[in-house]
Image (cartoon, helix red, strand yellow):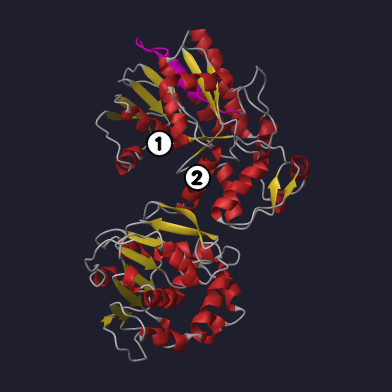
Amino acid sequence: MDAIVFGATGFIGRSLVAELLGRGQRVAAAVRNDTLTPWLVEKGVDIGGLTVVTADITAPLEGLPEVRDVYNAAARYAFGLDVREARATNVIGAINVLDWAATLPGLRRVVHVSGYRVSAPDGEPDYAGLGAYEASKFEGDLAVRNRARERGVPLTIANPSTVIGPGQYLGLAGLVRDLWEGRLPAVPGGPEVFVPIVTIDYFVRFLASIPESPAGEHYWVLDDATPRLPELVRTVADQMGVRAPRRSVPVGLLRRLPRRITGADPETLSFLSTERYPTASARSFAAATGLEMPSADDALRTWADDLVAERFGAASPWMRPYGFHTVAGSRTWIAGDRHTPDHVLLHGLPMNADLWAPLAARLHGSALAPDLPGLGRSAASGQPVEAWLGEVLSQVRTRPVLVAHSLACVPALRYAVEHPDRISRLVLISPPFLQAPGPKSARSPLAASVLRRMSTDRLAEMLGIPRGPEIDSAAADLRRPGVARRVVEAMRTVHAERARSRELLDRVSVPVEIIVGSADPLVVPVGHPVTELPGAGHYPQLTHPAQLAGHLEPVPGPLRR
C-alpha cells in the first residue's frame, strides 16, 4: 500500500483518503466502523485503490498492511471530555501509531495532524487550565516529537487552524450557529481576537504533498489573511442575511461570568487569542508545490451556505447547488438550477423550499426552489414579493413550469399575468383564496408566539402531515427571530386579498392547472382545469408526491431570455 490513514472516518481523515485516492494511490483506511466507504461512494470517489482495515489506536497496533506513508488524523475532538478519555486517543493513540510506524521497513514518512494552539516548547500540559481536549493535544504533540527522535522515525507535524468545509460542525461552527439562530448578542473576545481558518480541500492537498518533501519540518497551516473575529462574524452575517452583533465581550469577563449567562464553554476561551503563528515554512512549501490558499472571505461565505444547508449537521441537502444570493436588495436562499430550470417551485406557509424535496425527486428535468423573502432561510425584503419573484426569474433562460403552493399562488399569478412569455404553464397547488379560510386564531397577534414555540411533532399534527425532514426544516426556521411573525402577517395578507386574487385568474393568459387534495377542496368555482387528488390535504407534495409529479411535466417550448 502507498499510505495508511488513521482516523479515516473523521472530518479530516475521510477527505484525506479521498484526496490520496484521487492521486492514484493505494490507500489503507484504518477505522473502527466503516462509515467511510458509503461517504466516498456518495462523493463519487473511485474506491478501486481502497482497503479498509479495522484498527483501534488506543491499544498497540498489529496485523496492519505495510505502507510507505503513515498519516495520523485520529483525534478525540470535543469539549467536556474527562482526562482519561482525551488521553486515550490524543496521547496514547498517537504514540501507538508512531511505534507501529517505526517497525515498517519501507517507511518514508509519518505525518501527524496536531493543532495550531498546541505545538509549543517542552512543558507540562495544563489540564486544569486548558481542559482535557487542548491539554491532551498539547501532551500528544510533545510525546510524538520525542518518540520520533528516540526511534529515528521521519516525522512531519501539520498544525492546522480551524478547518472549515462541509461536515465541520464543531468549534467555530457553534458560533456561526448562534449567529444564525439569533443567540449571539455580542462577539466573544476583543476587537483584535484572531481565530484563523483553513479550508478542508486546501489542507488535505497540503497533507498529501508532505511525504515528498524533506522530513523534520513542522508546518502551521492556516490563512494569515483570516479577518479578525468581529469582522469574520460580520462576513458570515452578511452572507446569511442576519444582523451581526455590534458589541464584544472581553475574554476576562467571559471567564468570570457564569456559563448559564454567557453560553460559552470555558474550554473554548483559550482559542480567543490575538496571537499570530509562524506560517512562513508552510507558505513556502505551498508555493513550491503549487498550492494556492483560497480567499478567506469566499471560504467563509461558502461554509456558511454549507452549514445552513446541512442544518449544522442535522440534515442533508436535497438539491444542489444551494446558497444565499442577493435578490430585491435582500439575501435569498436558492437551491437548484438558477438559469435553465424546467420547473420553478414556490413554497407556501409555514414551510420553506425543502417542502418540495419528495416531489422534486420524482420530476424529470431540473428545478429551481427559493425560500420566499422573510420566510424559511431568506431575509425579509423591502420590495413586494412579485418584484422579488421577477428578479429571481430574470436569471432564468428557459420557459419553465411555474409551480406555486398556497401563499405563493398569489405572487405567481401576478407574475404570470405580467410576464406570460416567460413561463410555459402555471400550476397552482392548494390556492388559499379558492378554499375555505383557515381559523381566525391562526391570524391573531398571539399566533406568532405560539408558532415559534410549537414542537415539531405538534407542528406536523397541526398541518395534518407526517413528521419528516421537511417539517423539521420548517420548525427550525420558525424558531429564528422574526420568521414566525412574518408567517402570520402573510396569512393575514392572503386572507385580506382573497377577492382580488380570484380576479387575477380571469386575466392570466398562460395555461393554468389547479391541483387540490380531496380533503382540502375548492369552495369557489373556476374556469380552469382542476385536479383533485384522492386522500390528499393541503400539502399533496408531501403526502402524494408521485401522483402530483405526473401533472407537472413541462410543455416543450423554446429557450428564451
Foreground of the two, 466 or 203: 203
Looking at the rendering, the stretch of residues picked out in magenta corresponds to: 94-116
Q: Secondary structure at mark 1?
A: loop
The amino acid marked with disc number 2 is Trp
Residue 317 - label: none
Could you tell whether 154 is left or right of 63 in the image?
A: right
- Is residue 99 on the magenta stretch? yes
The answer to whether one can see residue 125 in this image is: yes
Number of marks: 2
Could you tell me if the residues under marks 1 and 2 are in contact, i.e. CB atoms within 8 Å? no
Question: In which quadrant will I find the C terminus?
Answer: bottom left
Could you tell whether 110 is left or right of 192 in the image?
A: left
Residue 303 - label: 2
Q: CA distance from mark 1 to mark 2?
A: 20 Å
Residue 9 - label: 1
In the image, residue 365 lies at what x, y percent? 26, 59
> Does label 1 or label 2 sit earlier along the sequence?
1
The answer to whether one can see residue 468 in this image is: no
- Is residue 230 on the magenta stretch? no
Residue found at x 58% / y 68%? 382
In the image, residue 87 lies at what x, y percent? 55, 29
The 10 Å Cα crowd at callout 1, few under 14, some 14 to 19, many 20 or more, is: many
Could you tell whether 314 is left or right of 138 in the image?
A: left
Question: In which quadrant will I find the N terminus?
Answer: top left
Foreground of the two, 231 or 360: 231
Residue found at x 35% / y 38%? 36
Q: Quadrant of residue 167?
A: top left
In the image, residue 299 lies at what x, y percent? 51, 41
Residue found at x 65% / y 17%? 121
Question: Height in image: 176 above or below 477?
Answer: above
